[in-house]
Amino acid sequence: METRENWALLESTLRAFHFDPEACELIFDYGSGHINDTMKVHNHRDGEFYILQRINTYVFKNPEAMMANILKVTDTLRAEHAAGRFAQATMDFLRTTDGEAYFVDAESGYWRCYHLIGPALTYQKSEDLSSFKKSGEAFGAFMYSLRDFPSDELIETIPDFHNTPKRYQAFEEVLARDVHQRAVTCRAEIDFLKARQALCHELVDGLAAGRLPLRVTHNDTKLNNILFSCESGEALAIIDLDTVMPGLAAYDFGDSIRFGASTALEDERDLEKVHFSLPLFEAYADGYLSSLADELSIDELHSLAAGAKIITLETGMRFLTDYLDGDTYFKTDYPEHNLVRCRTQFKLVEEMEVKYSEMKASLEWLQALHRS
Ligand code: ADP
Ligand code: GN1
Ligand code: MG
């Protein structure tokens, strides 16, 4: 990352968060997020570890509002945790010398810093049914703990983040421009998506018709946004709260499924390895409904399987759009990286289509099992 070379900038940032730069050891490019620049800081003064992040302001145009959202939500979660109603630890942001939860450097870069939670690990794909079930329990409990939080107090920091028809429009616009002449390299994926345009509407139509309620949702519930204890294997903390906003339960549920119910990595090149696993789906749904069975309406329950299919299509579409647009949004390691990611998502959509009635049936019996 550029900041590695710009020590002066980093030094001012560390000082703003009350660190002595000379006493800090930094590990750059920490973790595996696609968006922010993340560093691990070992502060030799107190022996503690911290996460220092430069916020991606191309993605988050209003970092002040994003941090305001996160602070409100973490305050609620911390109180729920202290009262013994929410098992997971909460991210804890350091204040700057100006008393803010973020620092703006001399080049208008936005930074924040929080305590590292651990020793912990994150999974880039599901390793076993049990930890994926635990992630379902944790994400379900997250939404449950925020059920009384007024969602209109949160700013929509990325407008229409999970508005799938609007994402489709954005795809069409980028395709029409085709500035990098890449469309010719992904005709099959473009056709796959075009054949599923109608599917994009199902959830937003449910919201517009008043069938599906807006809730406080995480909006980025993939398995690598949850920390697991290295010691006990329990779900320690839900991280990456950048997109906490009003949203639909089905998108949160579905996003966990698209990532964690796959048998392969999100960017696996060999599609023979990529399958949608019904046992993983059921493990997650089991955990999720154990936290939420009495909270979800019947319409919401019925929207969950669609949520999995739709957000997997949406995420594939976002990767495809970024590929066509020249890789401006997601971090990539090589020129076709976004296309490779798109292909795994579309393969999963195809398999979810085949197993759709089984997914719905599993949700029904798991709901019956957990309903009190
Ligand atoms: P991005 O938005 O780029 O995905 P994340 O907020 O998810 O950034 O952080 C990137 C990585 O940093 C995570 O995948 C995780 O490995 C690590 N990480 C983030 N927050 C913490 C934390 N509080 N404790 C330990 N590791 C963390
Ligand atoms: C991004 O930040 P990260 O890597 O947790 C993206 C998600 C995508 C995901 C795909 C703010 O998540 O929406 O689903 O990549 N985050 C943002 O892996 O766009
Ligand atoms: Mg992340």
Image (cartoon, helix red, strand yellow):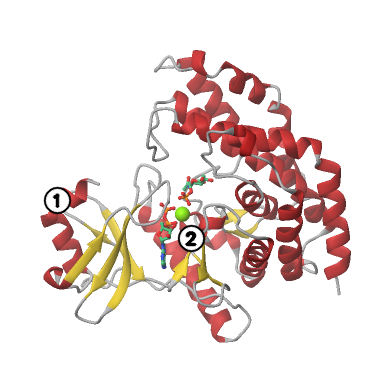
Vertical arrangement, residue 320 with respect to residue 109, above or below: above
Residue situated furthest bottom in the rendering = 83
> What's the mark number on residue 6?
1
Closest to the observer: 351 or 52?
A: 351
Q: Is residue 325 left or right of residue 363?
A: left
Label 1 sits on what residue type?
Answer: Asn
Percent of width and height locating residue 35? 40, 47
The image shows residue 292 at horizontal and vertical percentages of: 74, 67
Residue 101 in sight from this viewpoint: no
Marks 2 and 1, the one that precedes in the sequence: 1
Disc on res. 241: 2
Mark 1 residue element: loop
Q: In this orientation, does residue 315 appear?
A: yes
- Residue 362 x, y percent position in the rendering: 84, 54
Marks 2 and 1 sit apart, C-alpha to C-alpha, by: 27 Å
Instruction: Give SS at disc 2.
Output: helix
Q: Is residue 299 above or below residue 142?
A: above
Mark 2 CB lies closer than 8 A to ligand 1: yes
